[in-house]
Image (cartoon, rainbow, N blue to C red):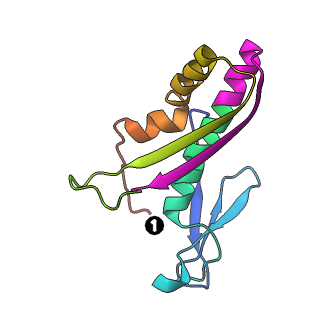
């Protein structure tokens, strides 16, 4: 992940549907499910957050294994937000299940698990985050 990332989110004519762009020619949608009044035209903000962690985990593991020339043939990441319901302490729980494919020994598998916890999105989500909000004209 680069040091500076800028994302723009804008309303559309459909309630709760949001267009998102990154200034590099990529554009995607976010929305809410129909049962809460959305058009279900895209993933919800929670799904987008989990997808960022999943993609970052997978890419980080692939890069690390390639650099080490380990026989990692595939990675699957499944993520759940508050899988057991809302936590009693009011916090958030993300359950991440990682499946590795390839002739990896136990030591390599354990190291890849450690590397997963060092991916940039994992660090962002588990570190202190400050959001400075400004109203601009």
Question: Is residue 9 magenta-colored?
Answer: no
In percent of width and height, residue 105 lies at: 66, 17
Q: Position of residue 78 (x, y in %)?
A: 58, 49
Q: Quadrant of the C terminus?
A: bottom left
Residue at (67% x, 43% y) in the render: 76
Q: Kindly tell me whether residue 65 is visible in this rendering.
A: yes
From this viewpoint, is residue 37 visible?
no
Q: Nearer the viewer, residue 4 or 59?
A: 59
Side of 31 where 84 appears, left or right: left
Please name whichever residue, 49 or 6, is drawn nearer the observer in this view of the structure. 49
74 up-or-down from 21: above or below: above
What residue do we see at 60% from left, 18% from top?
A: 106
Tell me what residue is drawn at x 60 percent, y 83 percent. Answer: 39
Number of marks in the rendered image: 1
Pick out the residue farthest to the left: 89
Instruction: Give SS at disc 1.
Output: loop
Relative to 28, residue 59 above or below: above
Q: Is residue 24 left or right of residue 35?
A: right
What residue sits right under mark 1 in the picture?
A: 137
Name the spot of residue 27 as percent of width and height, x first. 71, 61
Looking at this view, is 17 or 49 the one in front? 49
Q: Left or right: where does residue 27 sit relative to residue 130?
A: right
| Residue 30: quarter of image | bottom right
Q: Is residue 106 above or below residue 15?
A: above
In the rendered image, residue 126, in percent from the top left (x then y), is placed at 39, 37
Q: Is residue 137 left or right of residue 53?
A: left
Q: Quadrant of the N terminus?
A: top right
Q: Judge the density around disc 1: few (<14), some (14-19), many (≥20) Cα neighbours within 10 Å.
A: few
Residue pictured at 22% horizontal, 56% vertical: 88
Residue 68 in magenta stretch: yes
Q: Which residues are magenta?
A: 61-82
């Amino acid at each position: 992940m680069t040091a500076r990332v800028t994302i723009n989110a804008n309303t559309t004519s459909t309630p709760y549907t949001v267009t998102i762009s990154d200034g590099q020619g990529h554009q995607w949608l976010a929305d809410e499910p129909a049962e809460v009044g959305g058009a279900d035209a895209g993933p919800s903000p929670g799904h987008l957050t989990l997808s960022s962690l999943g993609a970052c985990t997978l890419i980080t593991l692939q890069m690390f294994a390639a650099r080490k020339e380990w026989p990692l043939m595939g990675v699957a990441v499944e993520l759940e937000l508050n899988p057991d319901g809302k936590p009693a302490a009011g916090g958030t729980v993300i359950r991440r299940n990682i499946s590795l494919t390839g002739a990896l020994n136990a030591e390599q598998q354990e190291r890849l698990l450690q590397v997963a916890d060092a991916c940039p999105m994992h660090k962002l989500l588990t570190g202190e985050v400050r959001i400075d909000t400004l109203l601009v004209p």
